[in-house]
Amino acid sequence: MAAPGAGTGMTPGTPSSAPGDGSLQYSLILEHLVGEKRKPRDVIPGGLGGIPSPIKTEEQKMMERVMESCAFKAALACVGGFVLGGAFGVFTAGIDANVGFDPKDPYRTPTAKEVLKDMGQRGMSYAKNFAIVGAMFSCTECLVESYRGKSDWKNSVISGCITGGAIGFRAGVKAGALGCGGFAAFSAVIDYYLR
């Protein structure tokens, strides 16, 4: 029995170029992948980075625009500030030894109702203040980011200065300058640790 490739002048294991072997199939596959017979595919936006994503409907695009708007961000920060401020106010009232005491009669022990009333008042006061500051900062940051067209640490510093200056300006120019500097520095530190 003759060995494979005997009589053809080829050694076993060398590729052949005769029709009907693997090289023809390889060229047909290449023709379908990159040649003239390749079928064009629909390009899905956002699907080029790995996981394909479906094309968004008009309702989804509208919801994205609403959620990216400055009004929505300010409202979200206002609600978050209200909740956080209320919790912080109730917590500080809970550890304050003078909650519920009447300054006119310091020797009288306050009732549980009076203590809860004072805790609620302090919680509501903190909640309102945190909500106002949160809404001012978030809205200002969104407007600064829209104006600059960039999303970096400078936005939070600028909006912190504007917010702190506006809050402190009610007590005078010096307090406004201190509020601007202090709030800008605080915003820079928070932005540094969050990014």
Image: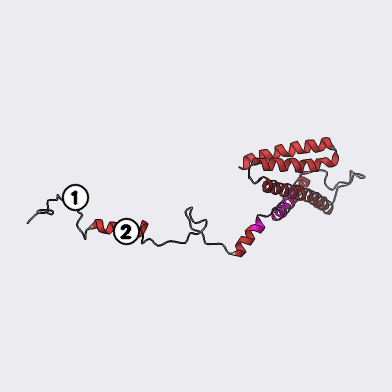
How are the colours assigned in the image? secondary structure
Label 2 residue SS: helix
Up the image or down, 112 lies above or below 39; here it is above
Q: Position of residue 72 (x, y in %)?
A: 70, 56
Query: Is residue 76 covered in magenta?
Result: yes
Of residues 126 and 175, the one drawn nearer to the viewer in this rendering = 175
Q: Which residue is mark 2?
A: 29
Which residue is depicted at the point 83% across and 54% down?
Answer: 113
Find the residue positioned furthest to the left.
Answer: 1
Which residue is depicted at the point 78% across and 48% down?
Answer: 129
Magenta stretch, residue numbers? 65-85
Identified by mark 1, the residue type is Thr
In this figure, what is the number of numbered marks? Answer: 2
Find the residue positioned furthest to the front.
Answer: 36
Which residue is depicted at the point 71% across and 41% down?
Answer: 158
Q: Which residue is mark 1?
A: 14
Q: Is residue 100 left or right of residue 30?
A: right
Quarter of the rendering occupied by the C terminus: top right
Kindly identify which numbered label has been placed on residue 53.
Answer: none
Q: Position of residue 25 (x, y in %)?
A: 27, 59
Q: Position of residue 53 (x, y in %)?
A: 51, 59
Q: Dot 1, crowdedness within 10 Å: few (<14), some or many (≥20)?
A: few
Give me the C-alpha separation between circle 2 and circle 1. Answer: 21 Å
Mark 2 or 1 closer to N-term? 1
